């Protein structure tokens, strides 16, 4: 059993990164060479995203298989509940077991565009916690990971409700948490304190995204609802039109952010590298 929890027991900051299946068929073969490169860099584990309702599902399984069995990486496979019946979930998890995947990140996921209101409201799993509970009660032998939000989830009415929902995920079986990205460490540290106050004892990894272009920041803020500190805004204003300088200072900002968290003794740092192994290489080198 390749549980990633073992990595968190060594008393060091666990370093990991996320990749996603490319949308275009012609980019698909390139992902294998990227996984080989990531393997050389040696993260403690990688996570692989899974399309909402199983879109790109076959690709995600194929990539997870290559990552685990050819690139010899420890893998956490995302699985989204929004478009899954219990039967479909059972099938997906059986496929992961078949290829030796022992860790899953349980997410509700975004509603597929073609999903009707009736389908959305009558789904088997309303929340990620429901799916976690189902997997645990079915006795499936997975280490389960949940998401947490330094800036509260857009559908949560208050910060308190959001933190309580995160605790529910842990109570339902999640043994590790990975945060949504953020650019101001105080939000993450405050979330960790709140979870600890509620008695949550599982490891919590900080999600960091190096910003390498002005356009990327705009998209990221829209999708994640995170706030942008003045220091990062200034980098965008100053270097947004100079790709080389923007990349340099954007990565420097992420390294500084991650170094500060490491010095504060965070359990782990999870990099959203947008399928760019060179970003992981640069940041891991600095953090090690």
Image (cartoon, helix red, strand yellow):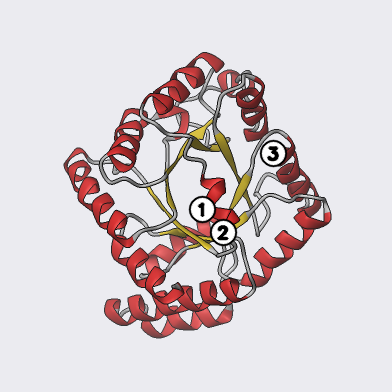
- Marks 2 and 1, how far apart in space? 34 Å
Tell me which label, 3 or 1, sits earlier in the chain.
3
**Residue contact at pointers 2 and 1, CB within 8 angstroms:** no
Could you tell whether 154 is left or right of 200 in the image? left
Residue 70, quarter of the rendered image: top left
Mark 3, secondary structure of its residue:
helix
Q: Which mark is residue 169?
A: 3
Crowding at mark 3 (Cα within 10 Å: few <14, some 14-19, many 20+)? many
Residue at position x 45%, y 56% in the image: 16
Indicate the position of residue 40 as horizontal and vertical percent values: 28, 59
Instruction: Indicate the quadrant where residue 140 lies.
Output: top right
Q: Residues within 10 Å of mark 2 (few under 14, many from 20)?
A: few
Q: Give the residue number, with chain letter if any, for mark 1.
A: 223
Q: Earlier in the sequence, mark 2 or mark 1?
A: 2
Quadrant location, the C terminus:
bottom left
Residue 10 bears which disc, if any? 2
| Residue 157 appears in the figure | no
């Amino acid at each position: 059993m390749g549980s990633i929890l073992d990595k968190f027991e060594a008393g060091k900051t666990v370093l990991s990164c996320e990749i996603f299946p490319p949308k275009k068929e012609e980019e698909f073969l390139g992902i294998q060479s990227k996984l080989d490169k990531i393997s050389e860099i040696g993260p403690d584990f990688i996570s692989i995203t899974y399309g909402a309702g199983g879109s790109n599902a076959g690709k995600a399984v194929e990539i997870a298989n290559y990552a685990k069995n050819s690139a010899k990486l420890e893998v956490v496979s995302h699985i989204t509940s929004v478009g899954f019946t219990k039967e479909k979930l059972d099938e997906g998890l059986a496929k992961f077991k078949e290829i030796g995947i022992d860790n899953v990140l349980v997410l509700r996921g975004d509603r597929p565009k073609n999903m009707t209101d009736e389908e959305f409201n009558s789904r088997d799993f309303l929340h990620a916690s429901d799916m976690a509970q189902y997997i645990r009660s079915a006795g499936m032998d997975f280490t389960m990971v949940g998401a947490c939000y330094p800036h509260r989830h857009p559908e949560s009415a208050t910060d308190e409700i959001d933190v309580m929902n995160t605790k529910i995920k842990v109570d339902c079986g999640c043994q590790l948490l990975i945060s949504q990205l953020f650019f101001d460490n105080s939000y993450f540290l405050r979330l960790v304190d709140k979870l600890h106050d509620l008695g949550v004892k599982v490891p919590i990894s900080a999600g960091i995204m190096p910003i390498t272009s002005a356009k990327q920041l705009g998209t990221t803020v829209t999708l994640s609802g995170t706030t942008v500190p003045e220091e990062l805004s200034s980098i965008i204003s100053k270097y947004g039109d100079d790709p080389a300088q923007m990349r340099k200072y954007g990565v420097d900002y992420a390294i500084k952010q991650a170094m500060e968290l490491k010095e504060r003794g965070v359990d782990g740092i999870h990099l959203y590298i947008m399928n760019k192994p060179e970003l992981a290489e640069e940041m891991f080198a600095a953090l090690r």
